[in-house]
Amino acid sequence: MAHLVPTGQLAWQGTTIDLTPPWPRLTVGEAFRRHAACSAKAALAAGRFDEVLALEVEPRLGAGPLFLVDYPAPLAALARLKPGDPTLAERVELYLGALELANGFSELTDPVEQRARFAADEAARCNAGKPSRPLPGPYLDELSNLPPCAGIALGIDRLVMLLTDTPDIAEVVAFTPEQL
């Protein structure tokens, strides 16, 4: 970010955001305790996790850069579980200017565990009356060859919004959903 914003200060929608590292981290559990009417576990059990995160938690995370870490394991199908706490996954989202800017995780490279997760997902789909899907055999066959790794997906469109102080993503994308 230092190359894109050499002053270390980003002007976004009337707020000046200090980009000086280190950027703070906040667990999902703590974010829900601070900002939501229910716990992350309760929101997940009620099938409302994304709703509560979007409507109650994200608007209160503040403008400054923040890493939201330690997502509930069921919300990270391809992520490695956190050592010492298998209820959490090694997943992170970066927020800047109250926008989710990036999403990443440590890759699950254990084909046995990944196959079991896919099978459990498939069973839940069938129990819900949804059509069956085949397991991704080639992916599972090659998974053991993947070395320990992690990745993060950066929303370039959101980064452009922040850098240009543009409030509407439709103003910075090449094609809006309506144009596709």
Image: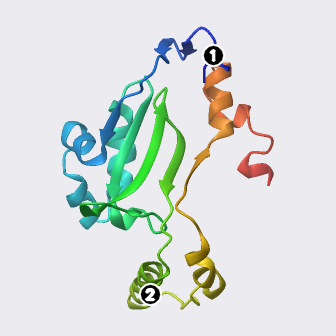
Residue 143 occupies quadrant: bottom right
- The residue beneath circle 2 is 119
Judging from the image, the colouring scheme is rainbow
Which quarter of the rendered picture does the C terminus lie within? bottom right
The 10 Å Cα crowd at callout 2, few under 14, some 14 to 19, many 20 or more, is some
What is the count of numbered marks?
2
Image disc number at residue 47 = none
Image disc number at residue 5 = 1
Which quarter of the rendered picture does the N terminus lie within? top right
Identify whether 2 is placed above or below 142. Answer: above
**Residue 23 spot, x, y in % from top left:** 41, 27
What is the three-letter code of the residue carrying label 1? Val
Identify whether 133 is placed above or below 164. Answer: below
Marks 2 & 1, CB-CB < 8 Å contact? no
**Residue 117 spot, x, y in % from top left:** 42, 79
**Residue 19 spot, x, y in % from top left:** 50, 18
Cα separation, mark 2 vs mark 1, equals 45 Å
What is the three-letter code of the residue carrying label 2? Ala
**Residue 113 spot, x, y in % from top left:** 41, 79
At a point 36% along the width and 29% down the height, the residue shown is 24
At a point 46% along the width and 44% down the height, the residue shown is 93
Residue 157 occupies quadrant: top right
Q: Earlier in the sequence, mark 2 or mark 1?
A: 1
Q: Is residue 160 left or right of residue 56?
A: right
SS category of the residue bearing label 1: loop
SS category of the residue bearing label 2: helix
Identify whether 58 is placed above or below 38. Answer: above
Q: Is residue 22 left or right of residue 150?
A: left
Q: Nearer the viewer, residue 92 or 12?
A: 92
Q: Is residue 101 left or right of residue 40?
A: right
The 10 Å Cα crowd at callout 1, few under 14, some 14 to 19, many 20 or more, is few
